[in-house]
């Protein structure tokens, strides 16, 4: 079961986003937060790229843009530039926390975490390529895209702004997988003081005796691809009411759905108005549906920093068994009493998005961990 947890997480948020993307034809959608327009979209927006929100929520500073020059979306000899949405908050002299959202969400999903964490740390949150208000290029997507995006963001933005290069990286769902994948990479691992996994997605290496599915022949693969594209396209067209997004979100906020409000629904719906959104989701889902390119087992083996599993124990998509297995693997690779490569787990009474469903408990867990590693 647990080897397919990436698929489960992707299925949930892909469903939520596909439900919302067809809402481009509503005549007017304005959402106000603290007296200012947070998102503003109209029917005309469906014909152009959707810009970032006109203001950030709560007490957070305005969004910023990073022009990421990369081979992703180009070719081996040509780089292309993608506009990446991010924000930063807090005293630049303090240690750095980088937050990475999950599949289909955006940095907005950390709305209740950033202001609190920024009281003690310099906090960054980034929109992954293809999601939120970052660009949504039509290209092949796999886990290495987001890993390299995070690594190069650390190098080009965070390290350019900070004398202290140390950092802790936290992520939810796909963002959790991305956080540990980046943290284990030789390009930045010397600077990573900690990795925080909030119901992280990922595929485990098959157990002994389990069979790896055979590659289908080209004809079967072509037919399967056509069917997948048709199903995903239908979901974009048929289901388009914000009420359906709310319904799906509430299913993964099982303990307290209070925070599934109009602000959150709109933060998912608005970026999906981008004309490339449907094709991007199709490509992400079909490329990663059988699991990311690196197994969680191998990533955990390469981690050289302390790890916090801050886990929503009522997650219907990524079960607690996934966290159990991560703990077993970590103990196997690094031992149970390793002074520099330890792992601990904090159980949160929440579902798939514990940082937003139970922000007070999550903030306390992150702050406690950060105090140990910095």
Image (tube, rainbow, N blue to C red):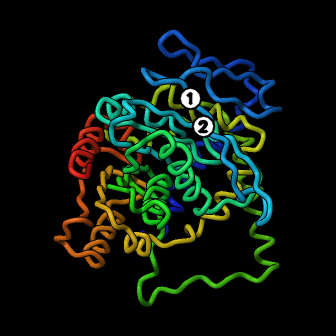
| Quadrant where the image shows the N terminus | bottom left
Using the rendered image of the protein, determine whether residue 1 is visible from the camera's viewpoint.
no
User: Image height check: is 71 above or below 263?
Assistant: below
Using the rendered image of the protein, determine whether residue 231 is visible from the camera's viewpoint.
yes
Mark with earlier residue (1, 2)? 1
Whether label 1 touches label 2, CB < 8 Å: yes
- Label 1 crowding class (10 Å Cα cut-off): few <14, some 14-19, many 20+? some
Residue that label 1 marks = 63
Q: Which residue is drawn at 32% across and 62% down?
A: 305
Q: Report x, y in % for residue 205.
A: 45, 78
Q: Which residue lies furthest to the top in this view?
A: 35
Q: What element does badge 1 sit on?
A: loop
- Label 2 crowding class (10 Å Cα cut-off): few <14, some 14-19, many 20+? many
| Snapshot quadrant of residue 23 | top right
Residue that label 2 marks = 85
Q: Residue at x 29, y 55 (%)?
A: 308
Q: What element does badge 2 sit on?
A: strand
Task: State the residue in front, 373 or 170.
Answer: 373
| Snapshot quadrant of residue 367 | top left
Q: How far apart are marks 1 and 2 (CA)?
A: 7 Å
């Amino acid at each position: 079961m647990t080897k397919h947890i990436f698929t489960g997480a992707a299925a949930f948020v892909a469903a939520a986003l596909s439900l919302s993307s067809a809402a481009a034809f509503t005549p007017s959608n304005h959402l106000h937060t603290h007296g200012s327009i947070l998102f503003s979209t109209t029917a005309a927006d469906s014909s152009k790229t959707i810009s970032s929100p006109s203001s950030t929520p709560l007490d957070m500073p305005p969004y910023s843009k990073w022009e990421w020059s990369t081979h992703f979306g180009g070719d081996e000899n040509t780089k292309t530039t993608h506009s990446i949405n991010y924000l930063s908050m807090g005293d630049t002299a303090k240690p750095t926390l980088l937050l990475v959202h999950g599949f289909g969400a955006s940095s907005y999903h950390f709305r209740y975490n950033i202001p609190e964490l920024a009281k003690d740390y310099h906090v960054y949150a980034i929109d992954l390529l293809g999601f939120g208000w970052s660009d949504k290029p039509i290209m092949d997507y796999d886990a290495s895209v987001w890993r390299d995006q995070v690594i190069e963001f650390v190098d080009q933005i965070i390290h350019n702004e900070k004398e202290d290069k140390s950092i802790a990286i936290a992520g939810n769902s796909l963002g959790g997988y991305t956080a540990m994948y980046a943290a284990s990479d030789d390009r930045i691992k010397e600077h990573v003081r900690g990795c925080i996994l909030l119901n992280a997605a990922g595929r485990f290496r098959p157990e002994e005796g389990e069979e790896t599915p055979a590659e289908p022949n080209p004809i079967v693969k072509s037919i399967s691809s056509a069917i997948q594209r048709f199903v995903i396209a239908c979901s974009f067209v048929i289901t388009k009411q914000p009420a359906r997004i709310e319904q799906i979100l509430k299913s993964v906020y099982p303990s307290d759905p209070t925070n599934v409000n109009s602000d959150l629904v709109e933060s998912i719906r608005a970026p999906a108005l981008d004309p490339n959104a449907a094709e991007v989701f199709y490509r992400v889902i079909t490329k990663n549906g059988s699991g990311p390119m690196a197994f969680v087992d191998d990533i955990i083996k390469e981690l050289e920093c302390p790890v916090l599993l801050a886990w929503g124990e009522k997650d219907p998509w990524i079960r607690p068994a996934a966290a159990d297995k991560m703990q077993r693997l970590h103990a196997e690779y690094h031992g149970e009493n390793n002074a520099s490569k330890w792992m601990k787990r904090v159980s949160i009474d929440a579902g798939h998005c514990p940082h937003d469903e139970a922000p007070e408990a999550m903030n306390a867990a992150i702050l406690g961990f950060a105090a140990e590693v910095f």
